[in-house]
């Protein structure tokens, strides 16, 4: 892969079960994520992948199990707390501000890091001004890194889908997350856009040392860029390991080929 060193477990999910009404979305799922790795979650439609990401960043609260993040045990996460502790997320359906420029959208990712109060920010004086300039510098670095200088002033709504996805990634990176959750970052992309996105994901992982948890349908992509893969089917875990192990797992093969459906 790269020169990065995969570290100890940073996120540990133990026996997570989640139901909506009588419907079980996740049943007794355990897996961990190591620092600096690319960890993929795969599975057929309706397997519970997005529900799992929602548990990690506090959108859903599981009825059973616990989450251990950086050694802290908790029953569930709170979304704001997750963000403050360094967990950022992109969404399957892009949730950008369509009328705002690329630059302004990415700046919204810095809000958590802004220390000066709103009054000072509104007046743009003293500490607020210095802080704003520091945040802009960080945002400009991300714009360069993701090669989107040419669209920095463009309203996001005017951009093609592949570039909107890249802006979504930029906004998440602006939070300087330790763990970045990517929900189908390549859905709806053509081959060239997918190749670009793969490269950026690996660069983020390599150069920023960001831990990445990724949901992706394209098996070729997953097997190429992931260090380890966990496989869900009907809300249960049916496989976990390095790509070659998962690829050879009979249960995984049958889930994907429809033999179990």
Image: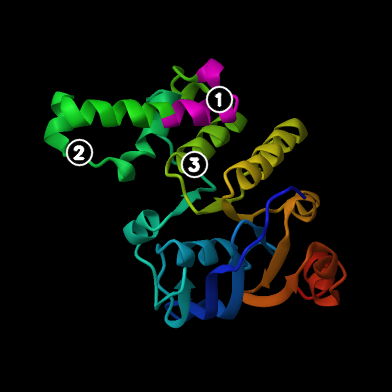
Please tell me which residue is depicted at 72% across the width and 56% down the height of the picture.
226
Q: Secondary structure at mark 2?
A: loop
Pinpoint residue 242: horizontal percent, then vertical percent: 78, 66
Task: Say few, some or many: other residues with alpha carbon within 10 Å of mark 3 (under 14 / 14 to 19 / 20 or more).
Answer: many
Where the C terminus falls, by quadrant? bottom right
Disc marking residue 116: 2
Q: Is residue 94 left or right of residue 131?
A: right
Nearer to us in this view, 71 or 170:
71
Q: Which residue is mark 1?
A: 144
CA separation, marks 2 and 1?
26 Å
Mark carried by residue 173: 3
Q: Residues within 10 Å of mark 2 (few under 14, many from 20)?
A: some
Indicate the secondary structure of the residue bearing disc 1. Answer: helix
- The quarter of the picture where residue 249 lies is bottom right
Residue 23 in the image: x percent, y percent? 50, 78
Q: Is residue 258 visible?
A: no
Mark 3 and mark 1 lie on one chain; the one further toward the N terminus is: 1
Which region is colored magenta? 138-151
Query: Residue 169 versus residue 98: which sits nearer the camera?
Result: 169
Look at 57% across and 34% down and name the residue there.
166
């Amino acid at each position: 892969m790269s020169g990065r060193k995969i570290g100890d477990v940073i996120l540990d999910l133990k026996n997570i079960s989640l139901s909506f009404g009588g419907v079980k979305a996740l049943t007794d799922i355990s897996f961990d994520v190591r620092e600096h790795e690319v960890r993929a979650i795969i599975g057929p439609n309706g397997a519970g992948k997005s529900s799992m990401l929602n548990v990690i960043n506090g959108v859903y609260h599981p009825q059973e199990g616990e989450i251990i993040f950086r050694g802290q045990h908790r029953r569930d996460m709170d979304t704001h707390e997750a963000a403050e502790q360094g967990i950022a997320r992109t969404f399957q359906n892009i949730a950008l501000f369509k009328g705002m420029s690329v630059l302004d959208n990415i700046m919204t990712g810095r809000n958590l890091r802004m220390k000066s109060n709103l009054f000072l920010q509104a007046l743009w004086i003293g500490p607020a001004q210095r802080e704003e300039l520091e945040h802009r510098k960080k945002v400009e670095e991300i714009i360069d890194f993701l090669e989107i200088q040419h669209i920095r002033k463009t309203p996001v709504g005017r951009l093609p889908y592949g570039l909107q996805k890249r802006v979504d990634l930029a906004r998440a990176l602006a939070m300087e997350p330790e763990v970045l959750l990517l929900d189908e970052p390549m859905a709806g992309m053509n081959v060239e856009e997918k190749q670009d996105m793969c490269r950026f994901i690996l660069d983020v992982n390599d150069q920023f040392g960001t831990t990445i948890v990724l949901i992706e349908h394209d098996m070729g992509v997953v097997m190429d860029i992931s260090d380890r893969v966990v496989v869900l089917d009907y809300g249960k875990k049916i496989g976990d390991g390095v790509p070659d192990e998962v690829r050879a797992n009979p249960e995984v093969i049958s889930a994907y080929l429809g033999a179990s459906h």
